[in-house]
Amino acid sequence: MRLIAVLTIVLATAGTVQAADPTFPSSAGNLTVQTVASGLVHPWSLAFLPDGRMLVTERLGRMRIVARNGQLSPSLGNVPKVFAASQGGLLDVILDRNFAQNHTIYFSYAEPFNGGGRTSLARARLDDGEVPRLEDVKVIYRQFGPPSHGNHFGSRIVQAKDGSLFVTNGEHFTDRNMAQTFDNDLGKIVHITPDGAPASGNPFANKPGARPEIWSYGHRNPQGLAFNPADGKLWEQEHGPMGGDEINLILPGHNYGWPLVSYGLNYSGTPVGTGKATMEGVDDPLWHWTPSIAPSGMTFYTGDLFPAWKGSLFNGALKFRMLVRLELAGDKVVKEERMLQDLGERIRDVRQGPDGGLYLLTDNSSGRILRVAPAK
């Protein structure tokens, strides 16, 4: 009887350890989705360190290092206080292009301001020793304008080849018409130096009364930003209202329409602005989702793990809980593929890993890092 009991325990344990990862169909064949790490609280952004570990933000105000085996570090010290309400908190994080030499990172967050929060960008040096922490933390940019009380912070960051930074700003779900005026940063993408000064060549630098850091305007709540490595062009993704989520090609000085035009409707069901989807002087989106999928996080795929997907643009979806692949021909979207819908997870961020896998952050109180790879 003891032998039978022992065999039962061994077999049960073996069955647990060897349980297969779930698989999902796709145009590249069946996909396997592996849990790399769990136990994260509303993770928002992911950056890969040179040794394959991951730097992850949690919206409540924690930043952690995740080992390759999924072990979570304690919360890093010296992270600034955040306005952790509704959509606000600790948001995007990226490594400096010269991180291997300077250990510099940039991170955005909703900084407490006048009873609410505003998008701010800080620079710090990552000390990932025995007690990991941030050193020399300095806020280099603060969104200019009235605060948000919990919505539309934008907050994605990318760094150009020259070291300058682009940062997305939402319109705070307050006076959305400020997205069309130049005396504030609401509903704008800004372009700054690594020290936070307006970058040279910005389109409104010499316009009287305009904020010199503004690069583009007329945005609602941009939560995706990426350079296309094929040609260096800057692409952006933003939430529409009830419908009208957009993918845009971002050009200096251009107007992207909010709140004058939209493919969506106000939450009340009334028309947005002019009631039209397009108008002269406004750039049309390259792609839009109506009804809204609530997109967040985007990356261009360049890896070898999925050869058929090279050059595709991947987007997470919060509301529709899926991963979306857009197939491109130059600056045109020619095909959409929706996948992982049966996973049932809110996808907050999408990153390509150094191994060519796609890494996803799931946005909930028990969030995970997932790795998407071809099924064997």
Image: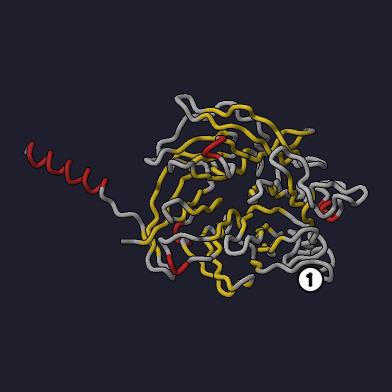
Residues 14 and 224: in front is 224
Residue 183 left/right relative to 340? right
Q: Badge 1: few (under 14), some or many (20 or more) residues near its Cα, within 10 Å?
A: some
Q: Position of residue 106 (x, y in %)?
A: 62, 39
Q: Position of residue 309 (x, y in %)?
A: 47, 67
Residue ID for mark 1: 278
Residue lying farthest top? Answer: 131
Residues 102 and 169: in front is 102
Q: Callout 1: helix, strand or loop?
A: loop
Please determine whether, in this image, residue 308 is positioned above or below residue 175.
below
Please determine whether, in this image, residue 16 is positioned above or below residue 339.
above
Residues 272 and 245: in front is 245
- Res. 10 visible in picture: yes
Residue 50 left/right relative to 2? right
Residue 101 left/right relative to 191? left
The quarter holding residue 45 reads top right
Give the residue drawn at x 58%, y 60%.
229
Please determine whether, in this image, residue 251 is positioned above or below residue 14.
below
Q: Where's the N terminus, which quadrant?
A: top left
